[in-house]
Amino acid sequence: EITGELNAKMQWAHYFCNVIACYLVVIEGWPDCIPFTNLSTVSSALPDLEMLLRVWESRSIFWKQLSNEEY
């Protein structure tokens, strides 16, 4: 929704080029205890995934639109 593009996808491997630079959006609030990387390539311990889901749902993690100055 934040990008205005229905086909926009998260791309972990090229997050800066294909997400931040392309759409001027970033993920804010990611917890320090979980590496910011494709979750299928790191430990997928259920408690960690459940915690991520809770913080996304509580909007503690969120997509932030960047201004040109912030970019």
Image: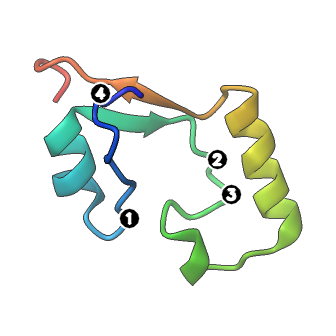
Label 1 crowd (10 A; few <14 / some 14-19 / many >=20): few
Q: Which mark is in front, 3 or 4?
A: 4
- Label 3 and label 4: CA atoms lie apart by 31 Å
Q: Residue 26: x and y, percent?
A: 36, 37
Q: Mark 2 points at which residue?
A: 31
Amino acid carrying label 1: it is: Trp
Position of residue 28 in the picture relative to residue 61 (left or right): left
Classify 46 as above or below 55.
Answer: below
Q: Mark 4 points at which residue?
A: 4
Q: Which mark is in front, 1 or 3?
A: 1
Q: How is the image coloured?
A: rainbow
Most distant residue in the left direction:
68
Q: Do the residues labelled 4 and 1 touch (CB within 8 Å)?
A: no
Position of residue 9 in the picture relative to residue 43 (left or right): left
Which label number is shown at residue 12?
A: 1
Amino acid carrying label 2: it is: Pro
